[in-house]
Image (spheres, rainbow, N blue to C red):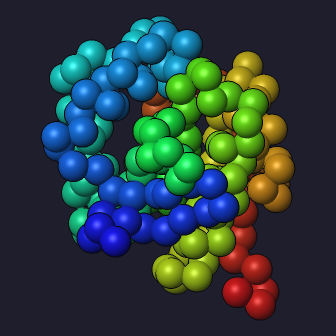
C-alpha cells in the first residue's frame, strides 16, 4: 500500500497526489463540462491553475491528511476523478468537494466517495463538522450532498463568485 493511500470504499481507492500526476488533473479540470460549476466563468482550468491546486492539495494532505484526493477505480486502476476536503477560506472549515470525468457521472461514484469521506473524517480527525456546497444550478452535485445526509443551511455567494447552496454534516453524538 502506497504512503499516499488514504482509504478504500467498495469500488474506489482514495489517495493523495504526486506532482507527476499533473496531467491527470489537467485532463479532468481542463474539461469544460467538469469545470463549468467551479467558477463564475465556468472556464476550464489552465495547466498553471491545475498545478497550483495540485501543490496545495499535496501540502494539505502532508500537513493535515486532508486535500482533494485522487479517485481510482479498484476494478481496473483507472483514474476517474477527485474527491476530498479543502479548507473553506472564509471560515477555515473542512469543505467536501468532488469532480469526476463525465463518463463516470451517474454511476454512484461521487456518492460513494463522499460517504466514505464523511465516515473517514470523523473516524480519523477531531473535526466537529464539515461543510459542502455546490452551485445552485448543479442538481447532481446537490443530490450527492443530500444522499450522504448533509443538512441544507443557506445560499451564499462563495469566494469564486458562485451562488451556492451550503450544507453541513455534524459529528454524530456517538462518533
Q: As drawn, is 21 to the left or to the right of 74? A: left
Q: Residue at x 63, y 48 (%)?
A: 132
* 173 shown above or below 11: below
Residue at the (29%, 67%) spot, across then down: 2
- Extreme residue toward the front, this view: 76
Viewer-closest of 65 and 169: 65
Q: Is residue 155 visible?
A: no
Q: Quadrant of the C terminus?
A: bottom right
User: Do we see residue 118 in this rendering?
Assistant: yes
Q: Residue at x 49, y 57 (%)?
A: 13
Q: Quadrant of residue 79?
A: top left
**Where does residue 70 sit, x and y in percent of width and height?**
41, 47
State whether residue 22 is above or below residue 60.
Answer: above
In this orientation, which residue lies closer to the viewer: 103 or 55? 103
Task: Using the image as rendered, state which of residue 144 and residue 150 is in the foreground.
Answer: 144
Q: Residue 95 appears at what percent x and percent y?
A: 53, 53
Q: Position of residue 7 (x, y in %)?
A: 49, 68
Query: Is 168 situated above or below 164?
Result: below
| Along the line of sight, the residue nearer the viewer: 43 or 18 | 18
Where 127 falls versus 52 (above or below)? below
Number of residue marks: 0
- 80 left or right of 141 in image: left
Q: Residue at x 27, y 16 (%)?
A: 46
User: Which image quadrant for residue 104?
Assistant: top right
Which corner quadrant holds the N terminus?
bottom left
Amino acid at each position: 500500500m502506497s504512503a499516499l493511500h488514504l482509504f478504500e470504499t467498495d469500488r474506489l481507492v482514495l489517495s493523495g497526489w504526486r506532482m507527476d500526476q499533473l496531467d491527470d488533473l489537467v485532463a479532468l479540470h481542463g474539461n469544460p463540462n467538469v469545470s463549468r460549476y467551479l467558477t463564475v466563468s465556468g472556464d476550464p482550468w489552465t495547466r498553471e491553475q491545475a498545478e497550483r491546486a495540485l501543490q496545495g492539495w499535496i501540502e494539505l494532505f502532508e500537513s493535515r491528511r486532508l486535500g482533494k484526493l485522487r479517485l481510482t477505480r479498484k476494478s481496473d486502476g483507472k483514474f476517474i476523478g477527485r474527491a476530498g476536503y479543502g479548507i473553506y477560506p472564509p471560515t477555515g472549515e473542512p469543505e467536501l468537494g468532488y469532480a469526476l470525468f463525465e463518463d463516470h457521472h451517474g454511476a454512484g461514484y461521487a456518492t460513494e466517495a463522499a460517504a466514505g469521506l464523511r465516515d473517514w473524517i470523523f473516524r480519523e480527525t477531531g473535526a466537529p463538522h464539515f461543510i459542502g456546497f455546490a452551485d445552485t444550478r448543479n442538481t447532481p452535485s446537490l443530490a450527492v450532498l443530500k444522499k450522504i445526509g448533509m443538512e441544507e443551511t443557506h445560499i451564499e455567494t462563495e469566494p469564486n463568485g458562485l451562488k451556492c447552496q451550503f450544507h453541513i454534516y455534524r459529528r454524530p453524538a456517538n462518533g
